[in-house]
Image: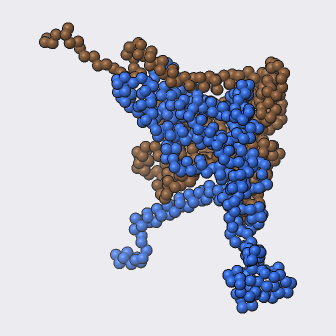
Chain colours: A blue, B brown
């Protein structure tokens, strides 16, 4: 008996303790994994953000040195620029001084903190000294890129295409989803299967005749300042698409039919049922459809690329940024600045509407 | 026996107003008519922008239709198909596309699945923040994202290679300038695009009935067994759905290689995807007949792969609602 109690007190051998310890281990392991993946996800953003605020010289310097936008510190005195150096003194101190008068044997320095004081004479060759560098962000890259790209113009183009298409998507998809959710159409199930089937239809197979058709009726590029090439990017959205119809139909089916019936008894036509009963109850689904379309339009690259070929003034941001960047590839800081500017709006919208957006993704992705 | 005189008060028949249930002939017809009216945008759109173009593009494959010449359209039989099957560049491009799909499909399923499992882990702290973080890059417009990654993967100054050097890899690859690294680099760029797949997988994992796990606990199963025997079969329909979508998407892969290589597919055609060839044929040379033939080839390839997936799904996709 005595041998058992002789176990040293500080070692906790209770099963619960080891359970806790293991839990802690598992928790920190999982957290570490998340941190590593998160780090990989965010690194390109960091690369971009810092690149966007550097000058050409800073980019060259940072290829071998610090990743931060450093540049030599300059002290301005009586309208003239003086470089600042780390100057060691015989007593072992190192002071940051501005080089005032260069000399081979001795140089004169002034103290930036006290420029009016007498110049400090230092023995030795100034070329051996280390220049002081400071952190300097060049936010003017953004305004440069903004002007060079004519950002407001392309921003307006994107917004116009997105909003006009958005109106079409909402009108047509709500209507079609309502038809699928509520009406006794013969062969409805087959039609619905065909609709869903269009999701897995590769776009190229319809691309060429569609393009040839729009080209024949003149809906490409621009004419006399009218962006006819916008029409192929807008008009087809007035004819519904599978993802959004699916999402809305799923939502409409969850609404109790009793509500429709009550409205019908009160003398509402099917159209009034839609506008007065179904739509007011479905705002969250309608908003997610709107967001999907907006993000799609903001992202769309291939459509504008082919339909707005050569109509530079009417291209949306995606194509404009790419053309700008092909042209100014030698100015990586501007390339990164434009990339950042183009992604601000979608990201901001996402952060505000995250919940609605993610729920929409889950409905369209999971229930099929 | 009834004391009520039936002739004076007819029996009450509740008036049914249930939409979609047959009651009177005319009402049902009226309902159908409304249904067709509401459905019409899609019927018109499907005919105009899907059905007709598919048939027309098949027709184009047998013609010399071109938007750049004024020659009359002529029937050329199988000449376009013959040209395509002997066009070395087209075959190279098809090879690049298939090779890339073979690389990208597994990652495109395993990564979002892994992230979903991670986000579902009981012990993860700050789940919502992580979910937002992993999803957010999906919102970055494609063109911006490509330029951001190009800079990140720059052989000298990019953070990726600087980081690799930092952790001791002396000679990191020149990702976008090396024929054998450019496809893996595109796959790597794709990690920003797994948000949707991750969310749908996460939602499905969360929807697996907890009784199944409890029963497995009683039988003494560990987490790994539970994942492979319960989670994976239960979410296999969503995996299947994402697999089909990603195969179709990869057959249409265009924007990334087009922007990164400026349409050239260099180095050495290693990034010359099939759609870049199609784009060049149809929108640089405006040879619509040959372009349509290429479109049909990739459509047939996609169709074969999709049908293959559907056939295989009988063996590995589990639908909980179905009886074996």
User: What residue is rendered at 60% in x and 32% in y?
Assistant: A237
Seen from the viewer's position, the closer of residues A218 and A343 is A218
Residue at 20%, 8% in the rendered image: B7
**Residue at horizontal 49%, vertical 51%?**
B120
Residue A331 lies in quadrant: bottom right
| Residue at far top of view | B7
Q: Nearer the viewer, residue A19 or B28?
A: B28
In the shown orientation, is residue A350 left or right of residue B53? left
Residue in view at x 81 percent, y 46 percent: B266
- For residue B121, above or below residue A204: below
Residue at the far front in the pictured view: A78
Quarter of the figure with residue A256: top left
- Residue A336 in picture, x, y percent from top left: 70, 54
Task: Inspect this view and state whether residue B200 appears.
Answer: yes
Q: Is A212 or B238 nearer to us in this picture?
A: A212
Question: Where in the figure is residue A201, as x and y percent of width and height?
Answer: 64, 31
Position of residue A276 in the picture relative to residue A61 (left or right) = left
Q: Position of residue B106 (x, y in %)?
A: 64, 44
Say if residue B231 shows up in the picture.
no
Above or below: residue A316 compared with residue A245: below
Work out which residue is located at the far right of the displayed protein and give it: A104
**Residue A23 in the image: above or below residue A251:** below
Where does the N terminus of chain B fall, quadrant-wise? Answer: top left
Whether residue A192 sits left or right of residue A43 in the image: it is left
How many numbered marks appear?
A: 0
Q: Position of residue A59 (x, y in %)?
A: 75, 62
């Amino acid at each position: 008996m005595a041998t058992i109690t002789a176990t040293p007190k500080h070692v906790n051998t209770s099963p619960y303790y080891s359970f806790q310890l293991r839990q802690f281990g598992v928790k920190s392991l999982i957290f570490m994994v998340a941190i590593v993946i998160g780090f990989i996800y965010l690194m390109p953003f960091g690369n971009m953000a810092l690149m966007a605020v550097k000058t050409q010289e800073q980019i060259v310097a940072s290829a071998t040195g610090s990743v931060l936008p450093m540049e030599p510190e300059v002290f301005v005195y009586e309208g003239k620029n003086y470089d600042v150096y780390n100057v060691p003194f015989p007593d072992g101190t190192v002071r940051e001084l501005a080089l005032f008068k260069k000399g081979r044997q001795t140089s004169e320095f002034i103290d930036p903190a006290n420029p009016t004081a007498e110049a400090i004479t230092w023995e030795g060759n100034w070329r051996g000294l280390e220049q002081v560098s400071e952190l300097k962000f060049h936010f003017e890259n953004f305004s440069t890129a903004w002007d060079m790209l004519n950002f407001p113009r392309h921003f307006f183009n994107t917004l116009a295409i997105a909003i006009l298409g958005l109106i079409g998507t909402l009108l047509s998809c709500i209507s079609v989803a309502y038809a699928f959710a509520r009406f006794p159409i013969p062969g409805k199930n087959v039609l619905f299967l065909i609709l869903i089937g269009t999701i897995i239809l590769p776009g190229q197979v319809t691309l060429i005749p569609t393009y040839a058709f729009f080209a024949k009726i003149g809906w490409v590029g621009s004419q006399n300042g009218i962006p006819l090439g916008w029409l192929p990017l807008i008009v087809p959205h007035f004819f519904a698409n599978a993802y959004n119809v699916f999402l809305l139909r799923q939502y409409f089916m969850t609404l109790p039919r009793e509500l429709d019936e009550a409205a019908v008894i009160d003398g509402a036509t099917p159209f009034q049922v839609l506008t007065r009963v179904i739509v007011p109850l479905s705002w969250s689904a309608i908003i997610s459809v709107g967001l999907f379309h907006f993000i799609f339009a903001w992202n769309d690259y291939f459509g504008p690329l082919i339909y707005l070929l050569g109509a530079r003034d009417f291209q949306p941001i995606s194509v404009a940024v790419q053309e700008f960047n092909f042209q100014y590839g030698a100015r990586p800081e501007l390339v990164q600045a434009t990339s950042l500017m183009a992604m601000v709006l979608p990201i901001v919208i996402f952060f505000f509407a995250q919940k609605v957006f993610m729920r929409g993704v889950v409905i369209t992705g999971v229930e099929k | 026996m009834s004391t009520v005189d039936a002739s004076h008060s007819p029996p009450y028949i509740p008036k049914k107003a249930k939409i979609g249930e047959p009651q009177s002939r005319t009402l049902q017809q009226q309902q159908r008519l409304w249904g067709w009216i509401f459905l019409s945008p899609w019927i018109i759109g499907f005919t105009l922008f899907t059905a007709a173009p598919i048939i027309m593009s098949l027709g184009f494959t047998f013609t010399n239709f071109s938007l750049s010449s004024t020659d009359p359209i002529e029937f050329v039989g199988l000449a376009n198909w013959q040209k395509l099957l002997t066009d070395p560049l087209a075959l190279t491009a098809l090879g690049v596309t298939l090779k890339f799909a073979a690389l990208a499909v597994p990652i495109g399923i395993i990564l979002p699945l892994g992230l979903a499992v991670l986000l579902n882990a009981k012990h993860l702290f700050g789940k919502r923040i992580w979910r937002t973080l992993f999803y957010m890059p999906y919102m970055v417009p494609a063109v911006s994202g490509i330029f951001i990654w190009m800079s990140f993967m720059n052989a000298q100054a990019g953070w990726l290679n600087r980081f690799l050097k930092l952790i001791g890899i002396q000679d990191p690859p020149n990702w976008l300038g090396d024929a054998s690294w450019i496809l893996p680099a595109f796959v790597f760029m794709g990690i920003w695009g797994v948000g949707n797949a991750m969310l749908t997988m996460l939602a499905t994992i969360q929807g697996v009935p907890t009784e199944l796990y409890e029963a497995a606990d009683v039988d003494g199963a560990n987490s790994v067994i539970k994942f492979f025997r319960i989670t994976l079969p239960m979410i296999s329909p969503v995996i299947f759905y994402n697999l089909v979508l990603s195969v179709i998407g990869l057959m249409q892969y265009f924007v990334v290689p087009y922007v990164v290589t400026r349409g050239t597919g260099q180095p050495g055609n290693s990034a010359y995807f099939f759609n870049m060839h199609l784009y060049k044929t149809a929108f640089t040379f405006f040879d619509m007949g040959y372009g349509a033939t290429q479109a049909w080839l990739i459509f047939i390839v996609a169709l074969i792969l999709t049908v293959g997936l559907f056939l295989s799904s009988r063996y590995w996709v589990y639908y909980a609602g179905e009886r074996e």
